[in-house]
Image (cartoon, rainbow, N blue to C red):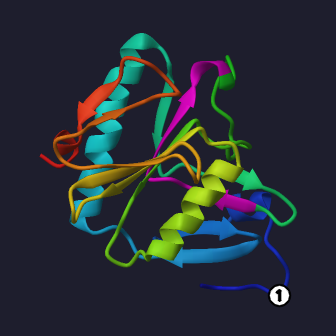
Amino acid sequence: MITSAKPITAEQFALMPDDGKRHELVAGELVVTPPPMPAHGESQAKTGSILLGFVRPRKLGRVFTETGFVISTDPDTVRAPDVAFVAADRLPESRLPRGYFRFAPDIAVEVVSPSDTASGIRSRVRMWLEAGCRLVWVVYPASRSVTVYRSMSDVTMLESDDVLDGAPVFDGFGVSVSDLFE
């Protein structure tokens, strides 16, 4: 983690030059993480692709990867889930904002990397839910499983043979967990 003398704002963060590393802003502090490993990247791409394949033809909203969302201010926190879904009625009618979204996505997907810790994942899930995210999927490539959070007390662990759904964000979506890893 790189820290600064005073907190960085979301606006300052957006103007930082690209140094080839992944960054997020947590309570005004810059956090640097290594790029994802292949299993992470593949799970991220498959999850995003499956979600996009359901959302796009139904015009339910938009799917994003590694896109920044300002989820708290003063000091600012800008997090970027591996995959995110934002419902159509929450998006501007004309074009996407030039800066970060200033709200949490409806669905945040976090793909777990070998360097992630259980407490770090819980912290990210809690941040998303407290910011207003309605559904968080935590994808575990190593165990080929998904943990679904609708709240910190409504948690479902899914294995390969189980079906991942989109409730309460949208109905009709269902994919076998194993499909995320094939």
Residue 76 magenta-drawn? no
> Please, what is the dominant secondary structure of the magenta stretch?
strand
Residue 86 magenta-drawn? yes
**Which residue is disc 1 drawn over?**
5
> What residue is drawn where x is 53% and y is 27%?
169
Residue 99 location (% of width, % of height)? 70, 45
The amino acid marked with disc number 1 is Ala
- The residue closer to the viewer here, 92 or 146, is 146
Q: How many numbered discs?
A: 1
Q: Is residue 29 left or right of residue 119?
A: right
- The residue closer to the viewer here, 163 or 33, is 163
> What residue is drawn where x is 22% and y is 44%?
180
Q: Is residue 40 left or right of residue 2?
A: left
> What residue is drawn where x is 33% and y is 51%?
146
Is 117 situated above or below 53?
Answer: below
Q: Which residues are magenta?
A: 77-89
Q: Residue lying farthest top?
A: 58
Residue 137 location (% of width, % of height)? 43, 47
Secondary structure of the residue carrying numbered label 1:
loop
State the quadrant of the N terminus.
bottom right
Category of crowding for the residue at label 1, using alpha-carbon neighbours closer than 10 angstroms: few (below 14), some (14–19), many (at least 20): few
Residue 124 location (% of width, % of height)? 56, 62
Is 111 situated above or below 32?
Answer: above
Q: Residue lying farthest front?
A: 153
Residue 47 location (% of width, % of height)? 31, 42
Mark yes or no: residue 167 visible.
yes
Mark yes or no: residue 21 visible.
no
> What residue is drawn where x is 29% and y is 61%?
40
Q: Residue lying farthest left?
A: 182
